Image (cartoon, rainbow, N blue to C red):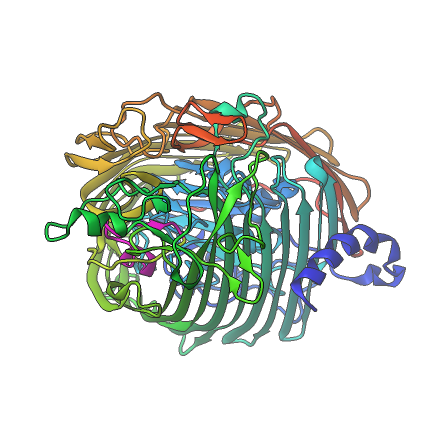
Amino acid sequence: MSLRALRRGLTASASVLAGSMAVGTAHAQQAVTLGEISVVATSPVGSGGGNSSRVQNFNEAAPIAASTAPAGTVVAAPRLRGSEQPLYKIPSTVETVTAQDVQADLGTNNVVATLARRTPALNISDSQGNSNRPDVTYRGFVASPVQGVPQGLAVYQNGVRINEAFGDIVNFDLIPPQAIQRIDVVTGNPVFGLNALGGAVNIQMKNGFTWQGTEISAWGGSDARTAGYLEYGKVSGPWSFYFTGDGLNDRGWRYESPSTIGRMYGDIGYRSQDAEFHLIGMAARSYFGAAAATPVDFTRNDPRAIFTYPQTTTTEVGTIQLTGRVDISPTWDLAGNAYFRRFHQTYVDGNDGNFEQCSRQSSFRGFLCFEDDGFTRAPNQTQLAFRNQFLILGQQNRAVPFTANVPYGTLDVTNTQATGYGGSLQAANRDTLFGFNNAFIVGGSIDAANYSFKSSSTLGVINPNLSITTDPNNPFYGTIPGLGTSFIRTAGALGIAPSSVNGSNLYLGLYTQDTLDLTDRLSVTAGARLNFARIQSEDLTGFSPDVTGTHYFNKINPVAGLTYRFFDALNLYGSYSESNRAPTPLELACANPDRPCLLPNSLVADPPLKQVTGKTYEVGFRGQLPNTYDGGIITYKIGAFRTDLSNDILSIATPGNAARAYFVNVPATQRQGIEVGGEYTADYLRVYANYALVDATFQFNGTLSSPNNPLAVDGAIQVTRGNSVPLVPNHQIKAGFDYYITPEWQVGLYLQAFSSSFYRGDESNLNRKLPPYYVMNFQTKYQVTKNLEIFGLITNLTNNRYATFGTFAEPGPVAGNLVINNARTTTLSQPFSVYGGFKYAFGADPVPMSPEPIIRKY
């Protein structure tokens, strides 16, 4: 079955399946929803299986065997395994999102919405104008689906790194939210390997041992959204099976911005007394429309306005994975995984061409040139030869005649493919050491990928409605009958040129970590990881020979920390760690200001970039106050952090044309801040609130290019030590509650508030900021019967008009009567939206009507 057929079928079938399912399925096991737990995996490999549980006391009696447990039973792990540690022994910050949290945002069908709502110091920047594809910024470090955004977070799914091979991008939209068991955001731990500068996002998915039952859900609402999923889990003796599939379709709240998503995820598990194995498969496809910021001159008149289009992104991924764990002895276990991953993305983007008649100094007066005043002539190059390099060449290398009053545009297409494979192996031991309790792990990982990247630009015209089209009857616009597509390039291949690059990545890691309990209250942790990276690229066009090359990076990253548990209500932690990330193939191949890239459309040059290195310090307190008001539990945390980066990588716009950019190392940047949070949980109420101060700054004095910044001088801005990193609000507040009005009826209200931040391209901090904003979401659900639940969700309850992303565009006429007078461009957030739907669980046991208290052992 194709993914397109799956997407359509799931959306329709989830809506009608409840009426067509036979009554005879009533004996199916009830779905089990697991709460937050006190055990955290301190490495990607984790426990190697489905042992997530509500462990309240590790000295409890042995659990019921999976094969004999009654329906709906949550099976606890008999002991800690692998890299699992109680939270009170982890010397850094851990933020957890549970399946219950994800369900509260069901109408969004988006796990990023849950992360943003619950996690301190995490904000989103919606550069794409689509809530399914925002940049996730945690403590000033980014995980983004957009090629060209420097990535500072490592993301793992079931122990496999899912930062894609070519640009380290992260596609959260390809993960089915209903299949998520829990998400841990872990900081200060180099064991998670490359990109963990700001931390790692570790996603653990459900399997048949942790979730049993049959459930369907369907919902719809604003912007013609229809969505639904089917979920099934079962245990049969030592075997388990889990499957889920979902689909979503809407037209988007902005013009020309539809979203279509289809996803499948499955897990076959086997468990014996001393081993557990899982075979996991996933396939997903997403399609999104217009994806860019819009000039404020346009959105002032119509908030739904976009800039030039088409802008479509089609992404497909398929993964197969084998994970396993074996108890070698009562104190040793071995865990590992192996995977194969296939990634394919096509991006079509209509852009302003920024073309003009060749200058009088050129011998090609009367023909079309590309920004021939935007680059610097080489010392040994004549003025005439330099000018001629910017001549636009079309089919058969013919110069393109200039026509006055034509709003030139381009249709830019990229195609990225990557095939990745690898695995990891980890041994863990819990013998005593010199009479002290001790937890030791040692492991290694290998991640390899082959990739290809192709891009091209076709000459087009910007129409009055801002669409960019080509004319088959014109030999320079688009497709020529009998000759194929007319790709354009500059004579010097300095700004525009088709690209075709093949390459490979090889990432190796070796790590070890040990936690020693010096007393029953004091634990000391120490460890290190060796990262090795080899990146190879080969230019296949002949236009960019400098792209061809092999680069090597390596670093040993240590970690050291301690925790002291004064008592359950007061736990101290502190740590020091180091981290690194290697430049991506995209960054390495686009690092020359004289040969910039139309991101992500061209790869043209390959000067060396240095790897980014980080040093992180953390200290804080956390604890739990049980049996407080009305028998509830209060958990709290307060902490401070600081990360110093050397050789940070930035994306810089080129003088003369902001659409083209290159990557550069800068000497130093810094992220530091404070996080404070608290939560009260009872059997009928959960209330939470947290605050984060995030101070992300540049730690150098220098000049950067930002040609469209209104306050730039000759296209350049001056950065001063202490200037703020754009798009990172200093002050961030999250608060909310879930309350059961009756045992069947629950309501929730969630608030997020952020202070102002600077526009991208304003690293000098001289322009007006993006304004501060707040957003409120409301959700409710009602248990109609033991099997049927109806729910509703309202996002942006107060219909605030705010922007989370801003940058600058070149002022001037565009097409027709459209003119950009104000250089600021923003992406407004989705307005007031309403969704409603139902969930139906097939089973004889009732769904729990109220949440159990969330017990965390400190």
Tell me: residue 457, above or below residue 355.
Answer: below
Quadrant occupied by the C terminus: top left
Tell me residue 741's x, y (percent): 71, 28
Magenta residue check for 591: yes
Q: Closer to the camera, 580 or 686?
A: 580
662 left or right of 786? left
Residue 562 visible in rendering: no
Q: Main secondary structure of the magenta part?
A: loop
Tell me residue 826's x, y (percent): 46, 30
Quadrant occupied by the N terminus: bottom right
Residue 154 visible in rendering: yes
Residue 283 location, quadrant: bottom right
Residue 502 location, quadrant: bottom left
Q: Closer to the camera, 39 or 580?
A: 580
Tell me: residue 803, above or below residue 781.
Answer: above
Q: Residue at x 17, y 46 (%)?
A: 383
Tell me residue 534's x, y (percent): 26, 69
Span highlighted in magenta in the image: 584-600
Tell me: residue 175, above or below residue 755.
Answer: below
Q: Residue at x 80, y 56 (%)?
A: 844
Tell me residue 561's x, y (percent): 24, 50
117 left or right of 580? right
725 left or right of 168? left
Magenta residue check for 656: no
Q: Number of callouts in the render?
A: 0
Residue 132 location, quadrant: top right
